[in-house]
Image (cartoon, grey):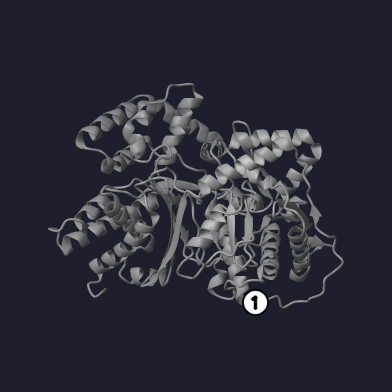
Amino acid sequence: MENQLAKSTEERTFQYQDSLPSLPVPSLEESLKKYLESVKPFANEEEYKKTEAIVQKFQNGIGKTLQQKLLERAKEKRNWLEEWWLNVAYLDVRIPSQLNVNFAGPASHTEHYWPPKEGTQLERGSINLWHNLIYWQLLRKEKVAVHKVGNTPLDMNQFRMLFSTCKVPGITRDSIMSYFRTESEGCCPSHIAVLCRGRVFVFDGILEGSLITPPEILRQLTYIQKKCHSEPDGPGVAALTSEERTRWAKAREYLIHLNPDNLTMLEKIQSSLLVFSLEDDSPHVTPEDYSQVTAKILTGDPTVRWGDKSYNLISFSNGVFGCNCDHAPFDAMVMVNISHYVDQKIIETEGRWKGSEKVRDIPLPEELVFTVDEKVLNDINQAKAQYLKQASDLQIVVYAFTPFGKKLTKKVMLHPDTFVQLALHLAYYRLHGRPGCCYETAMTRYFYHGRTETMRSCTVEAVRWCQSMQDPSSTILEQQHKMLQAFAKHNKLMKDCSAGKGFDRHLLGLLLTAKEEGLSVPELFTDPLFSRSGGGGNFVLSTSLVGYLRVQGVVAPMVHNGYGFFYHIRDDRFVVACAAWKSCPETDAEKLVQLIFRAFHDMMRLVNPAHL
């Protein structure tokens, strides 16, 4: 899967969708057994016994009824979880999603042909956009390669949500609008929205049936930037998307009521292929330190990104790029795929356009001028203020660990992903003096419309190993033995989760079944140990492997006293991104990352005594 770039292929991108297996419902007994195992690190003996009794009661009582109902639902739906997950994890959430839910990441072009350089923003931006248009065309023609594990195809449905997709706020629940169509399905929007200094412009990516070229895109971007730099800033309507969801829904309703043309303009942004953001900043970035640029991409100017858009392509004045994406319609692997595709194309072409410089007679970009009044301007100011306050509270560090990477861990027979996860647990244990409940994303794309499952990586075995590493009387042999036990447990859990045998989504299904049946919430879910072990979205460590390519990302912590932790793995390095809230006195992303790097060395020494 690592090197599957979009390429011309006999197979069509979405051809296996109808033949994928349905998402299974795991056995109740198995899920409850795994759940009990997962709470052990966070309970004393008395607490554990109490939870054990609650689980037993659930299993023999209401749990049986709920399981039966869930199995009935699964007979009717190919993916019993899909709609529930979308609502509970994303669309019902009322907190501002741009900072708390979106994921973001820097492009790695800076490591080769596009190092930071003032005056390159528009020229590079036009080449970057062109590669994105080519990828869009490949997707329309269904020529993006089907992802597979061995010969088994994976679900590709999320790729339909990459372009021309946008979340729309609702008073109690948001919705997702997707305007993308493959060529065989019919027409599809082809315009790009550009945000610059509080103003919004659109231009078409197609002229007379063919894509516009980088020199033509450059002409459009130059026109927009010159206009914005020589005239007053716009009102910055985009900032409203960073607001608390119900407030934004009300502000949007008011905007539409003010002038129906405002709705037409909102729909133009919603249906655009992507939003291209022209930022004025020049963030610092090196191959070893992505901290500042990553922070800017996640927490930058709210008037030049549309927080609800599935794809904001962000450009800075020093020719550095990144993306900021709404998490509701897809998971990070979609973005990883297109980012890697664009990066490879930039390498292949040495970062230059080698085609014709001819610019056809193309219509100038159209500006979307919203009708606003005092109330709208106040709403925008209020949105900006709350966004900037929260953004300034986010501590983000992104560093590369370069002494070794995947090559060496595989040489000593250790799974590189598990290696990073266990280093994180040891670092957290050393910094906080206790284990941290942890969510690692597992992929369930073997199944129809499968997305993710929670893999709880803070196992009893991991904690025993952390304790032995902090125990001066523990021998190297004991530490090594305990570490290998922790590795084995982690690898097995991850395999189970990907095979549809995780338990967190299953428990959620049982809880939602109870709610739909009008039953009271079972005690299992109100037991303090449920949330203390991470249940109900309370994981102190929210983590995800971004992959084995050169693509990095970041996400805000799930809870106030927690960490967001994304990482990617290369042959010669581990690149880790860690986020924490500054207003939480006990968390420190910088310290945690330094302790992770120390743990990498300590772990390598256990299996390779020659490692210094």
Picture layout, residue 369 above or below residue 255? below
In front here: 597 or 611? 597
Q: Give the total number of marks visible in the rendering.
A: 1
Tag 1's secondary structure?
A: loop
Instruction: List the single residue furthest toward the right.
Output: 361
Using the image, determine if residue 546 lies above or below residue 215. Answer: above
Residue 401, percent across and down? Answer: 39, 68
Q: Residues within 10 Å of mark 1 (few under 14, many from 20)?
A: few
- Residue farthest left in this picture: 473
State left or right for residue 195 relative to residue 464: right
Q: Is residue 75 above or below residue 272?
A: above
Where's residue 435, x and y in %?
Answer: 29, 47
Question: Residue placed at 26% from the left, 29% from the top?
Answer: 53
Q: Position of residue 62 (x, y in %)?
A: 38, 24
> Is 214 on the left or on the right of 416, as rendered?
right
Q: Is residue 55 above or below residue 442?
A: above
Please state which amino acid type lies under the numbered disc 1: Thr
Q: Nearer the viewer, residue 574 or 244?
A: 244
Q: Along the horizontal axis of the image, is 184 left or right of 456?
A: right
Residue 154 seen by the camera: no
Tell me where residue 602 sits by quadrant: bottom left
| Residue 483 seen by the camera | yes
Position of residue 74 measured from the top left corner of the image (x, y, whole percent): 51, 36
* Residue picked out by circle 1: 349
Which quarter of the figure is the C terminus placed in?
bottom left
Residue sitting nearer the eye, 266 or 188? 266
Name which residue lies at 87% across and 66% down: 361
